[in-house]
Image: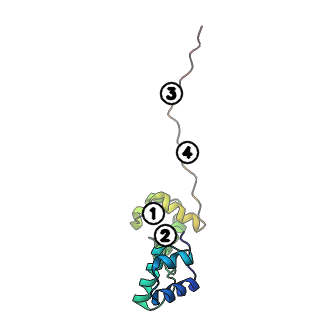
Amino acid sequence: MPKVISEEKRNDIVFHKERGVESKKISVFLRVTTRVVDKIWEQYQKTGNTENKIHNCGRKSVISKELERKIIDEIKKTPDKTLLELINEFKLPITEGGLSKWLCKRGYTFKKRQLIQPSKNAQTFKKKEKSS
């Protein structure tokens, strides 16, 4: 995760850029990259402030609050639905693993897997031949 530049450093960058100091000298003095100096200066020229834009960042959930409520209600109504059935029913753009993690974060655990009977006709392993 990128390091957040303090408001004090941001103000120092603007102070020095207004006085004509080169970005390279500012970056060496404040121990930041020249790209950071240039980005903060561009932000100041466009908006007039140097505030750090950290709110509302990161990956957004593909499941809205309304859809979340519907999914939880459906799970409570029919708890033996599979993840794939939920994905198909609500047309979710998410994988089964993603939905499983999403449900686990909300306190729902997975149900027991179906026990599949082994085939009685198929040989499951080869017996070792005895050497004489």
**Looking at the image, do the residues carrying marks 1 and 2 touch, with CB atoms under 8 Å apart?**
yes
Q: CA distance from mark 3 to mark 1?
A: 36 Å
Labels 4, 1: front one: 1
- Mark 2, secondary structure of its residue: helix
* Numbered disc in front, either 2 or 4: 2
Nearer the N terminus, badge 1 or badge 2?
Answer: 2
Q: Which residue is mark 3?
A: 123
> Please, is residue 33 above or below residue 80 in the view?
below
Find numbered disc 4 in the image and state the secondary structure of the residue it sits on: loop
List x then y, in percent, for residue 29: 56, 78
Q: Earlier in the sequence, mark 4 or mark 1?
A: 1
Q: Residue at x 50, y 27 (%)?
A: 123
The residues tagged by marks 1 and 2 sit, at their Cα atoms, a distance apart of 8 Å
Q: Amino acid at mark 3?
A: Gln
Q: Which amino acid, by three-letter code, is at mark 4?
A: Leu
Q: Residues within 10 Å of mark 3 (few under 14, many from 20)?
A: few
Q: Is residue 82 visible?
A: no
Is residue 51 or residue 115 the one in the foreground? 51
Foreground: 128 or 42? 42
Label number found at residue 115: 4
Residue 55, percent across and down?
51, 81
Separation of marks 3 and 4 at Cα, in angstroms: 19 Å
| Label drawn at residue 71 | 2
* Proximity of marks 4 and 1: CB atoms separated by less than 8 Å: no
**N-terminal label among 3 and 4:** 4
Estimate the x, y position of residue 9 in percent, counting from the top left.
56, 83
